[in-house]
Amino acid sequence: MTKYISIDPGKYKCGFVLADSYKKKVLEAKVILSNSLVKNVKKFQKSDENIKVIIGNGTSSRDHIKDLGFLKDDLFIAEEKNTTYRAKERFFEIFPINGIKRYLPREIFIYNLNLDAISAIIILEDYLKLTFDVDSKVNPKTWIK
C-alpha cells in the first residue's frame, strides 16, 4: 500500500491531499497555509515512512520544493498546467448536484469556494494516471478557508 501526498502549491495557501493509491481513495483533503506545508508533510511522514509526495510545478513551487528537499527520492514534481481551471469540473464529479439544484447555474455552487484541494487531486491523478474516489469521511467544508 502506497500513500501519496499531493500538493497544489501557492504563495499563501496550498491544496493538500493524502491518498491511498492501492485503494484509489482520497483520505484527506484540505487547504493549508503555505508556511505550514513542511509541518503537515512531516506529520504524515511520521505515521508512514514510505509516503511519497507529489508537488505541482506552478506558483511558488521552487521555494516549496527547496523546503521539501529532506524528502529526497520521495519527492516528485508534476505538471500542473490548467489544474485550477479543471478543478471546477472535477468538483461536480466528486460532489454532484442533485434535485432541484440541478436547474440552477453551477457556478453559484463554487463561487468563493477554494478549489486548491481539488487541484491537488487532479495533480495526483494526472501523475499516477489513476482516478481517485473521495472517502465519504472527507468533509468538503474543510476545503474552504
Image: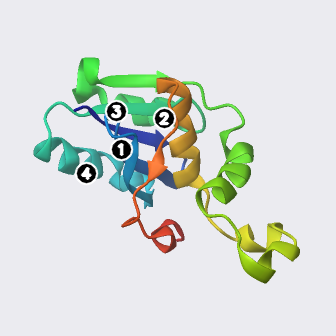
Say if mark 3 contacts mark 1, CB within 8 Å.
no
In the picture of the structure, the residue carrying the numbered disc 3 is 53
Give the residue furthest to the front: 99
Circle 4: element type = helix
Indicate the position of residue 80 as horizontal and vertical percent values. Answer: 61, 32
Nearer the observer: mark 2 or 4; the answer is 2
Q: Is residue 21 left or right of residue 2?
A: right
Circle 3: element type = strand
Above/below status of 20 relative to 91 = above
**Residue type at numbered disc 1:** Ala
**Residue type at numbered disc 4:** Lys
**Residue type at numbered disc 3:** Val
Circle 1: element type = strand
In the picture of the structure, the residue carrying the numbered disc 4 is 39
Residue drawn at x 35%, y 49% is 37
In the picture of the structure, the residue carrying the numbered disc 2 is 124
Nearer the observer: mark 3 or 4; the answer is 3
In the picture of the structure, the residue carrying the numbered disc 1 is 19
